[in-house]
Amino acid sequence: MKSNTGFALNAAAIDKDIEWFFEFAGHRISLYQNQENNLEELYTIEPPTFSEAEASLPYVSFVLQLTIEERIVLLLAFLPHIRPEALDFFLTRNDLGLIRTEFGGLSGSQHRGFIPTGETALFLLSANNMMKRIISEHIFSKEHFFDFNNILHLGEVKEGEPRLSGALTLSKEYLCLLTLGEPYQQEYSKDFPAKPISTQLDWEDLVLGSETFDAVQEIDIWLQHGEQLLGDPDVGRKIKKGYRSLFYGPSGTGKTLTACLLGKSSGMAVYRIDLSMVVSKYIGETEKNLAKVFDIAQNRNWILFFDEADSLFGKRTQTSSSNDRYANQEVSYLLQRIEDFPGVIILASNYKSNMDQAFMRRFQSIIRFPMPSENLRMTLYKKAFQGKYSLSDEINLNEVARKYELSGGNIINVLRYCAMMTINNKETIVTEDNFLEGIRKELKKIGKTL
């Protein structure tokens, strides 16, 4: 929905639903003021219908899947974002000068209007009918597709306070989808310490040994057919949702690129978790930080990529102190969240031996990314130095590939250096001197000499 016409039509459809909401809410207030409890009369106020042309609009195509009750709750959560003054009629006070408890609601630190809660929704839906109230509470359960698909949920409340006093919160993702018709790009923050990663390369650009490549293809097959397997009565009830894999091996051997390619081929976003913002020295903070990531990612079509994962998923210590016991509790928490996550999780580490064995048992695959062999190094050089930045005939590529053990990442750094020197020197090919200097720089990084 990129055109102004599309935006205008979608906005008009939202306006139609808002008018219906006000009619419904107004009648509910009238029943309340007259101390009436007539559910049948309340639900005679039916939502608007839409034409076939309107049915394809982002807002309409979504709400047509909802019941009347779900549509009311969605609009209630939606209104503070698009009409901040719309719910001010709930700000009336009782004889004691207090905001009416039965209306629910919260005040924001910056938003001056009425913030609806679960109690507000049930006031509208149940008309003081206890059975209707109990049935309608299901809308806020973890099993309901609102929460399951991260559409809307109730905010956290302090211990001991009623759950329905939590703020009715519409996710940023669905706010964006319903108004703009476009997916929301999750922003990097302390509440979501993860960034999307992607690549312009394709599978033919990935150079791996056959054993590693075949193991990676198993994940790709799961991404293509996992839903079918989970729906198979002979298999689905016996296996857990999601897929967990460990990539291990030296830096620069293709672990991150492989994760990006799996996302690219399956159409799934890949998010790399910033472990520096997750791991905390304070007791319990690591759990809270990771919970935020999993809560946001839950039931989204994402791949979570934990680089240098041994800092978070490493071996547990002996319980010789209270801090050790808390650290081990954190690992147990991580195990549970990883097992329950329905998407794909990839952990990357330089060394398999650094990982806690409890995690190892929960991986569907453990894939080694070794330093490339001589033949693979030859392939990497040929793929890197093709086209504009070709190598001088003086360079004995066979000898270079045989003598110097470099990773694919190192070889790309050699290409970067050589391309810069070629442009700077106004040359047309990569000279032997520049090529060997690039290799020397990479060898020095890993403590070797030319």
Image (cartoon, rainbow, N blue to C red):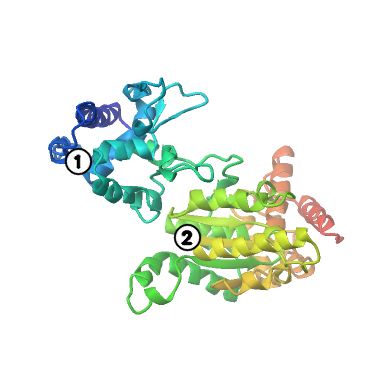
Q: Nearer the viewer, residue 246 or 398?
A: 246
Q: Residue at x 71, y 42 (%)?
A: 420
Tag 1's secondary structure? helix
Q: Nearer the viewer, residue 207 or 282?
A: 282
**Res 179 seen here:** no
Earlier residue among tags 2 and 1: 1
Q: Quadrant of the C terminus?
A: bottom right
Q: Residues within 10 Å of mark 1 (few under 14, many from 20)?
A: some
* Mark-to-mark CA distance, 2 and 1: 30 Å
Q: Is residue 294 above or below residue 405?
A: above
Q: Determine the residue located farthest toward the front in the rendered image.
A: 96
Locate residue 177: give its quadrant. Answer: top left
Q: Are marks 2 and 1 in contact (CB under 8 Å)?
A: no
Q: Position of residue 243 (x, y in %)?
A: 50, 67
The circle on residue 182 is none
**Res 259 seen here:** yes
Viewed as shown, does residue 415 lie left or right of 448?
left
Q: Position of residue 176 (x, y in %)?
A: 39, 36
Residue under label 1: 55
Q: Position of residue 9 (x, y in %)?
A: 23, 29
Viewed as shown, does residue 364 lie left or right of 11?
right
Q: Amino acid at mark 1?
A: Ala
Q: Amino acid at mark 2?
A: Gly
Q: Is residue 341 above or below residue 53?
A: below
Viewed as shown, does residue 3 lie left or right of 68?
right
Locate residue 335: give its quadrant. Answer: bottom right
Residue under label 2: 343
Q: Residue at x 52, y 50 (%)?
A: 200
